Amino acid sequence: MPEGNARHRSGTRDPGLQPERTRLAWRRTTLTCAVAASLAGRQTLSSGTGPLPLLGLALVVLAWLAFLGAAHRRIRTMDAPRPPALSPRAAVVAVACVLAMTLFGAATLR
């Protein structure tokens, strides 16, 4: 039997590069959200500074900051030798932020 299978069955875990890949995925997603927020800001500024577009922009930035905080906490936990699984609460926060950015960003296009 190969040594890797014996190690897997004994209960010890060798995560390899998986935590690093997950950390990089969170960083890419954060960067993507930052680009979406900046495009929403650009669209708002180019279409005029009425109260509704500015409110939409403020909500996009707020949702981005919330996502940034959630992503930063998750990135920090990935530094552990055996990082814990993503909690359901953190997953809901991340999804809610992305959906909010989508809705508020669409509102800035009107």
Image (cartoon, rainbow, N blue to C red):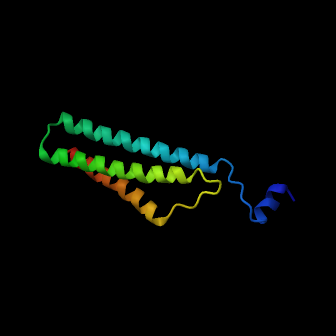
Left or right relative to 12: residue 34: left
The image position of residue 100, as x and y in percent, is 31, 55
Q: Which image quarter is the N terminus in?
A: bottom right
Left or right relative to 20: residue 9: right
Left or right relative to 108: residue 50: left
The image position of residue 67, as x and y in percent, is 39, 51
Q: Which image quarter is the C terminus in?
A: top left
Q: Quadrant of residue 31?
A: top left
Residue farthest to the top, as pictured: 46
Q: Quadrant of residue 81?
A: bottom right
Residue at the (24%, 47%) spot, across then down: 58
Residue farthest to the right, as pictured: 1
Is 78 in front, or is 51?
A: 78
The image position of residue 34, as x and y in percent, is 37, 41
The image position of residue 69, as x and y in percent, is 41, 51
Residue at the (56%, 49%) spot, across then down: 22
Residue at the (41%, 62%) spot, across then down: 92
Is 17 in front, or is 65?
A: 65
Q: How many marks?
A: 0
Q: Is residue 100 above or below residue 38?
A: below
Residue at the (59%, 46%) spot, across then down: 21
